[in-house]
Amino acid sequence: METTLQVVDPDPQVVEPSTQADEPSKPLPGVVALSTCPGTTPGTPLSKNQLKKQRKLAAYVELRKLRREKERERNKQKRRDAKEQGLPIRTGPSRKELKRKQAVTGADGNPALKVAIDLDYDELMQERDIAKCVKQCLRIYTINRRSSHPGELHFAGIRENGNIHKWFMKNDGWENWNVKYHFDKTHKDLFDREHMVYLTCESEQVLDKLQPGCTYIIGGLVDHNHFKGLCHQRATEAGLKTARLPLSEHVDMKTRSVLSTYHVFELLTKVAAGQDWTTAILDTIPVRKGAKAKDRTEDSEPKQPDEAEPQDIESQPPPSGLDS
């Protein structure tokens, strides 16, 4: 008995499903994003060491409140011991005194210094850079709080439940800071454009003097020069005034004249308190930049005339050997 096997050929009409939906969407041309930055590389799977670091960081965050309570208890015990020994409890003003101190106002009732940190760069920074950005905001808050002439401080452009907002929430008591938070509203929505100056190192205008009633905007972008000139570009496209700090006019530096966000703010607070630009710059910028005050003796020396002016003949003394 013979058996025959029937082979069924595959249907030649079958077409493989399209994978177009699985392909990542390409960014639009001209749109600035972290994925289109030439200095970044695509993500890779985490290694064992990176996973270990993530677990350690999660454990650190969980134990942060417990460590903070132990630190407060140690500080209380130190104050009790100092009081029993007759020693001063603190060397500076208390936290309550610092909190009661409000922004110094001028004769017109406006604050002596008004600064807004532009945090509308949430999607352009990696997680580590966002952490550095929020840390700089913490330092700005501390500088303003302990300044002899504190100003009115704004944190603008924070995305609701965005990356920067989430890093702010990791700091206990951040809602109680003497700072005005603005969520989903940028400086362009909050302040008068005619009295607003965006500080960028690319600007051709030099900030010689702080103007009363003016709001100074500082870009809160930590990008390691991946988006060089972006703050200036956004400001000019929005039709805002720009200015740069007079660093090259007062000091000579070995490195580039680019400062971090909190260094710019510290400079403004010192100048608003009455310091001159040269002293404020030398006291603020890091030592590694090798800043030295400019020698202005050459500019102050009087210029010598090219030719001596002829003297009056009658006023000249007579030649020796002749009677007058």
Image (cartoon, grey):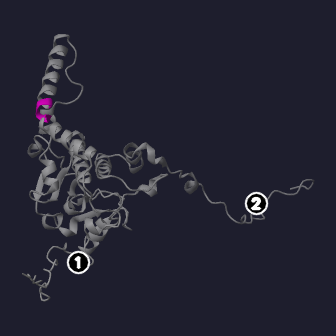
Left or right, 55 with reference to 129: left
* Residue found 29% across the figure and 53% down from its top: 261
Q: Is residue 227 visible in the rendered structure shown here? A: yes
**Amino acid type, label 2:** Ser
**Amino acid type, label 1:** Leu
Q: Quadrant of the N terminus?
A: bottom left
* Main SS of residues in magenta: helix
Counting from the top left corner in percent of width and height, residue 32 is at 26, 70
- The residue that mark 1 highlights is 28
Left or right, 77 with reference to 31: left
Counting from the top left corner in percent of width and height, residue 216 is at 25, 59
Q: Earlier in the sequence, mark 2 or mark 1?
A: 1
- The residue that mark 2 highlights is 315
Q: Which residues are magenta?
A: 63-67
Assess whether mark 1 and mark 2 are in contact (beta carbons under 8 angstroms). Answer: no
In depth, the one of 124 and 55 nearer the eye is: 55
Outermost residue on the front side: it is 1
Q: Is residue 110 visible in the rendered structure shown here? A: no
Q: Quadrant of the C terminus?
A: bottom right
Outermost residue on the left side: it is 1
Occupied quadrant, residue 154: bottom left
Q: Is residue 98 above or below residue 272?
A: above
Q: Is residue 231 above or below residue 134?
A: below
